[in-house]
Image (cartoon, helix red, strand yellow):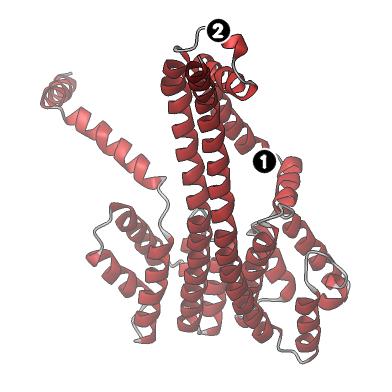
Amino acid sequence: MSENLIILDSWIENQKEGKAFSFSLESINDWIIARQRISLNWKVMFFRLLSTMVNAWISILKAISILDKQEQNPILKKLYSEIIHWIRSWKNLSTCLRDYDDNFTDSECSIIESGEKTWKLNSALIQLADQVEKIENMTKKIKGALIYPVAIIFVMFWAVSVLMTLVVPKIVEIFWDKSKLPPLTQILIWTSDFFVNYLWLIIMFVIWFIIFIWFWKKTPYWKYKFDQFMLYIPIFWSMNRKVVLSKFARVLSNLLWNWISIVESLRIVSDIAWNEVYRQRIMLLREDIKKWIKIWESLEDDALFPDMLVQMIKVWEETAKLDTIIIKIADFYDDEVETTINNIQKLLEPIIIVTMAVVIWFIAIGIMQPIMNLSEIVSNN
């Protein structure tokens, strides 16, 4: 009984000192850290540093410990400490990384596992660093190409909203009989009234539409339809296909180079496919290969795969150097994606400028036309 009282008194003192509160904050902090994703830049640096130390005959445990000591990021320190714990429990690196499937893909873990089995971990890590870096650079270029038009559209919508809700109503007040105004001005007044009364509804509708699309494309059927639609957008269809083909070729090449079977490689590539249409087609290709059908025979006359790619695969598949030609195809499509992005940026700029000019012209004519008519009447009188 006396021991229970001592424990109770100790707990009350901890409550007074705020220790329980600090413990809850620490738990919340750990929960947040556990759900943070690591950046692609860190993955590139992690693979390269680890490759350098492995090449210097430093054990994986020692290499991870070195990286842990010099790391300041709490997210990465937690990751390093858990990897060190599992390696000391006689797990290999690939098994440890598979527990973090939100940060490390199946293809990356499979390549590391193959490197461990074939004693070529150094080469596998270098390949992974190059693969992640190239994919990250491509992703940055695509985002950079899309940020500009999205930002311009947002600024244009904000400017029009300000004009319609603050400027146009003040100018319209000078006209007494609005029924005799020009049709363009009446349309402008109607638009202004709609913005004044329903601007909140427009904003809510846009937010609702974005949320609806986000959840709508999560369902399997509509995800396929959405990805299929993205492949046929007039401006972006070429870029979308080339991006998917580049990533497909690069990951498949690295898997094959590390002696992973073609059937297993295609399964891994399909699991990390960036487009549901291509994912299902890759799975169909995998089933064809199980039936001893060659890759080029399965992909021939398929609109998803260009004839040039199929013919290159046909030539090099017959020479048993598929991994070599696939990586060259990936490099080729990387250059094509960059060229396409530059062309899209050059095409979007005049389209956006013309659109803004039309909107400004509509507002300016709608405001100035009745004023000019009024000045003509006054001058005639």
Three-letter amino acid code of the residue under disc 2: Asp
Note whether 90 is above or below 32 in the view shown: below
Work out whether 112 lies above or below 324: above
Q: Is residue 192 left or right of residue 257?
A: left
Distance between mark 1 and mark 2 Cα atoms: 50 Å
Residue 206, percent from left and from top: 56, 30
**Residue 19, position in %: x, y?**
17, 31
Q: Position of residue 284 (x, y in %)?
A: 82, 62
Residue at the bottom extreme, as displayed: 319
Nearer to me, 224 or 128: 224
Q: Is residue 201 above or below residue 361?
A: above
According to the picture, the residue beneath numbered tag 1 turns out to be 217
Q: List x then y, in percent, for residue 172.
A: 48, 16
Q: Residue at x 32, y 42 (%)?
A: 30
Task: Report which residue position mark 2 lands on.
Answer: 177
Could you tell me which residue is drawn at 45 percent across and 82 percent down? 122
Q: Is residue 187 left or right of residue 203?
A: right
Where residue 187 is drawn, which disc sits there?
none
Specify whether 358 is left or right of 12.
right
Q: What kind of residue is marked 1?
A: Lys
